[in-house]
Amino acid sequence: MAIEVRAASVFDDVAAVVGPKRPDANVCFCLSYRLTSSKENLSLRGPARGERVRELCAEDPAPGVIAYDGDEPVGWAAVHPRADTSFATNRRIPHLDDLDVWSLWCVRVRPGHRKQGISHHLIAGAVAFAREHGAPMVEAYPVDNGGERVDLTMAYVGTRAAFERAGFTKAADTTSVLNGFPRIIMRLDLR
């Protein structure tokens, strides 16, 4: 298996990984943190969510990266300048400084492709993508689960161990809790 990670500029590939099975479903579609306005997030229903993601895929930079096994999209990582996300105003995850950091908030691997190391490729690919676009620092908000199992529906934020393996270090605690585990801020300096 040769995994290649590329910019998420092909909507159909993004939809294959994070889109709903039914186009009228009101699933996240990885917009919850990407949009700066909770009002916009709540107003997008059914197919409108997919159309908003289609618009984001056409922008530069793209809304994240996709991992491919050959031509098949097998994973997704959301990474973008924090200023263009809800993390810009999130009260539970504090700003540590005024650096124009990029946020990496979602890592998802498709069923049937999990436990093959694809998440590691996604994190590395997201970091490379941010670096290519001039990011001075990448920040992630994983759970600090101490090796305990994280419910699959909440595992999208990643774990402290996964980000440590990618060279990130803990920068701060947060008041955010997911699946009973505290979320922390982890950073990787790209300067």
Image: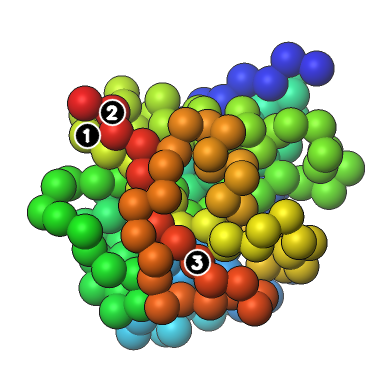
* Labelled disc at residue 183: 3
Of 95 and 124, nearer the camera is 95
Decide if residue 53 is on the left or right side of residue 95.
right
Give the alpha-carbon distance from disc 2 to disc 3, as whole Å: 22 Å
Decide if residue 45 is on the left or right side of residue 35.
right
Decide if residue 190 is on the left or right side of residue 6.
left
Q: Which residue is mark 2?
A: 190
Amino acid type of disc 1? Pro
Mark 3 or mark 1, which is nearer to you? 3
Tag 1 or tag 3, which sits nearer the N-term? Answer: 1
Tag 3 or tag 2, which sits nearer the N-term? Answer: 3
Of 88 and 145, nearer the camera is 145
Residue at 62% from the left image edge and 20% from the top image edge = 4
Measured along the vertical axis of the image, is residue 64 above or below residue 116?
Answer: below
Measured along the vertical axis of the image, is residue 57 above or below residue 72?
Answer: below
> Judging from the image, what secondary structure is the residue with disc 3 in?
strand
> Judging from the image, what secondary structure is the residue with disc 1 in?
loop
Residue at 45% from the left image edge and 61% from the top image edge = 184
User: Is there a contact, CB below 8 Å, between mark 2 and mark 3?
Assistant: no
> Judging from the image, what secondary structure is the residue with disc 2 in?
loop
Amino acid type of disc 2? Leu
User: Is there a contact, CB below 8 Å, between mark 2 and mark 1?
Assistant: yes
Amino acid type of disc 3? Arg
Q: Which residue is mark 1?
A: 136
Colour basis: rainbow
Residue at 27% from the left image edge and 38% from the top image edge = 137
Measured along the vertical axis of the image, is residue 76 above or below residue 116?
Answer: below
Residue 47 in percent (x, y) is at: 57, 69
